[in-house]
Amino acid sequence: MLVLSSFFKQVIKLWHAADLALIGQRRERRMRMLASLVLLLIGSLWGTVFTLRGAWGIALLDLLLILCGVGVFILTLRNRVRLANLLLFGVIILIIVGITLVLDPYSTAAPRATHLYLLPLAVAALMAFRDEPLWMRYGVTLLCLGLFTVLASSSWSPTSAYVLPDEVRVSGTWVQSIAAMLMLFVLLHILQSDAAERSMLDRDLQAALREQQFVVHYQPQVDCAGKVTGAEALIRWQHPQRGLIAPAEFIEHAEKTGMIIPIGQWVLEQVARQLHLWRTQPLFADIALAVNISQKQFRQPSFVADILRLLDEHAIDARRLDLELTETLIVQDIEDLLSKMAALVERGVCFSMDDFGTGFSSFSHLKRLPLNTLKIDRSFICDVLTDRSSEAIVRTVISLAQSLGMTVIAEGVENEAQQQFLQNHGCTQFQGYFFSKALPLEEFKAFVAQHNA
């Protein structure tokens, strides 16, 4: 019994420590999918009823429900979260207001009840638009509460042609009131649980920094001869209960909460220390280490000073430090970006553009930036042998980089045929599982010793 009790306690502990950010995303996705199916079912059912009765105005509302359900379902499948939420909430608000005014007006026998659904809808908006700008998140919520107040304080109705009989509305008032309050209770519980989960993840990340639970793995970057020329430093979370956690499971949350700034600084510190240790070792002295830099981290006023301090404190060759930027960062504030890059390039720091081709940077921006390397995104590499568009994009990027005097690194190379294609078209640097996954430090050192000796 003691063993079973201990086992179940551990299971519960692991459950609560699970990746809360991804759980929340999957839960919201499932809720949108379920909502779209409910809209399809309700719209089809009542649309049929009111069509048979010849109530074409109400049937059009039901058709709107059906179209909304289809739209939300498709947008959710395509991961267009903002559009799916805006469509879902916009149509539901319109339907609730329409039904309240047309079918469910106030009378002495039966008060309005349909407008009560605006209360749980306001709470749902706080969750659905949680990661959107504040004006959108609270704007939708306040819209729901404002409409609830107006409808609860008014008995106005544009027409009496479709008003339901009082005997139907009396029982319906009880049913709708109970249903709306139950929905409100469930959503408030989910909102509270979600806030507690996010708070727990915040505490876990803070503890990970404090207790040095993060580790750095290194994915080799090799040339045509198989010699290791550099590596990408990738953070991992060595969780005391869950084991090794990939960055995809916590980096997005760290970005949203600002924790990415101290986490990113920690990675830079580790990389600087490693470069310092390797500077006197012939086998590793020429190895360059690439570090991903987040938008929030780069925007810090002290970013340049922090990098220069690391270079001076650890007495490292700045040419061995490669800072990887994303195309999203480039379109934010080009002038600030240029000034910071220029200050670091002057000291010898190298810059790469990560996942090139997936963002929105223009050729004019690319021409102005002091970049050393373009990294072709893995999404193009995986299809380069089977998709003509991917093939054309890869060839174009390689040609563009060569004309600008930049190095090209192909990410996500998984087989010899891909490498051969890239090599035939002028790409000489590769990174991917065909060569090696991201390795712990000692395994990476052994890999370099095997390939560079």
Image (spheres, helix red, strand yellow):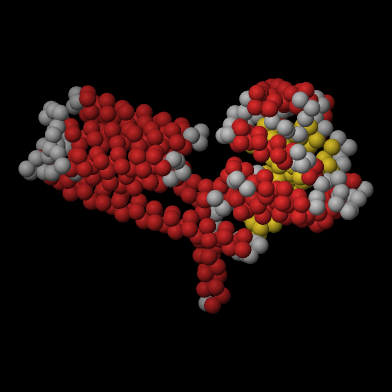
Name the one closer to the observer, 165 or 224.
224
Which quadrant would residue 166 be assigned to in this image? top left
Residue 402 against residue 201 in the figure, above or below: above
- Name the residue furthest right: 453
Q: Residue at the spot x=84%, y=43% of the render?
A: 228
Left-right relation of 220 to 281? left
Q: Residue at the spot x=78%, y=23% of the render?
A: 403
> Is there any visible trace of residue 38 in the rendered image?
no
**What x and y, as percent, mark residue 199?**
48, 58
**What x and y, as percent, mark residue 171?**
15, 46
> Is there any visible trace of residue 368 in the rendered image?
yes
Name the one closer to the observer, 200 or 176.
200
Residue 300 against residue 48 in the figure, above or below: below
Left-right relation of 272 to 119? right
- Name the residue furthest left: 108
Q: Residue at the spot x=77%, y=42% of the render?
A: 347
Which quadrant would residue 111 be assigned to in this image? top left
**What x and y, as percent, mark residue 428?**
82, 32
